[in-house]
Amino acid sequence: MRIALLGPFATEPFRAGLGLALTGAPPGIIQTPIGPLGVELIKRGHKVCAITLDDAVSEACRFEDGDLTLVFLPLRKPVSRRSVDFFEAETKALCEEIDRFDPDVVHAHWTYEFAEAAVRSRRPHVVTMHDVPLEIAWLFKNLYRTLRVGMAMRVMPRIRSLTVVSPRMAGWARLHGYFRPVAIVPNGVETPAARRTRAAPWTGDGPVIAMVGDISARKNIPTGLAAFRLLRSAFPGASLHLFGGGLDAAFAAGEPGVVGHGPVTHATLMDFLAQEADILVHPSLQETFGVIVAEALVRGVPVVAGAKSGGVRLVVGEDLDHLLVDVRLPEAIFAKAAALLNDPVLYRRTAEQGRQRVESQFSDRTMTTRYTDLYQHAIAGHAGSGAQGPLAADAGRRP
């Protein structure tokens, strides 16, 4: 199949996963499931064109290597300029790139401008809902997020095939105007071959705590910092490593034991989890899935996260439900983290259960198979509906 993937992505996973140089390609936006999905699709013999919008480029940039094409399209500045017309110019540019690639199926991620382009393409399409627009608007309470709700409400009723990344989102899809069947396809994560085993929860001067997020209220980093101060009193050598936008040295402000790394590459973050971190503390108040939780668990790193933080409970499952706490309370985070760090047996059991769960339930290979099944279904449904899009006549003949 020829598959167009629309949405934000980082370039690095394509380089690393496929061994490509992609010389001169921008770094992309952020690490999302698009990279691992695209890599796995190409490994299975499909041709992939990943298309994104990037405010770091001033004109369209295209990079081709083998079965992969990456396209970076400009975003108008300031954000208000593109928001008031619902990203109209950007949507038209996305549609032009879809036509240029001529895919068998379009897979758009997020239910905003990328979904709008997929629907307008009049081709077989699948749209993945990664967040809940109404929920996000309630959390941020600003005009931009309100306009984004309008974009979602406009496109959702017109989507022909929708997936969500956790069961709780299925009902939300209907509240945004989508009434067809909803497929639940969790985010897939890379499952590394190398496994880390430790005889004790931590070694050296003290436990190493990782925290990943940004400075938004949704990620709740200040509460995580407060919990770390309690941990530091119990484990004087403990260190906290912050990763993400705004979480740099200035944010850490010289606080004892706190290291602000800021935004780093996905590979750097994964290496830190695999080799350095003893625990991931994830105080986020709301997650539709919780990719970083899965990425830590599959690397043998126990996670303390929110009992009411959306899709996190799906990731950890019933056996690891004991890892979840009220992340609004620093004392609750501290108590759970301290219990793991003080009990080698509990720590090792938790680490192994987490690894096994993610490997069996959320590997990128498993999720890619589910998506390719949906692509075939979308293509068959498009042809059977008598649609007059570009592929209505030859959906089954393209390599």
Image: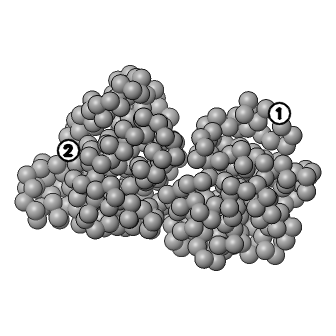
Residue at image point 27% right, 36% down: 91
Circle 1/circle 2 CB separation < 8 Å = no
- SS category of the residue bearing label 2: helix
Question: Is 69 placed above or below 362 here?
Answer: above
Q: Residue 146 location, x and y as percent?
A: 40, 40
Question: Looking at the picture, which amino acid does disc 2 mark?
Answer: Arg
Question: Is 71 placed above or below 327 here?
Answer: above
Q: Residue 325 location, x and y as percent?
A: 69, 64
Give the quadrant of the C terminus. bottom left
Q: Quadrant of residue 198?
A: bottom right
Q: Residue 337 location, x and y as percent?
A: 78, 62
Q: Quadrant of residue 213?
A: top right
Residue at image point 26% right, 43% down: 117
Residue at image point 11% right, 65% down: 384
Question: Which residue is label 1 attached to?
Answer: 254
The reply to whether residue 26 is visible in this rendering is: yes
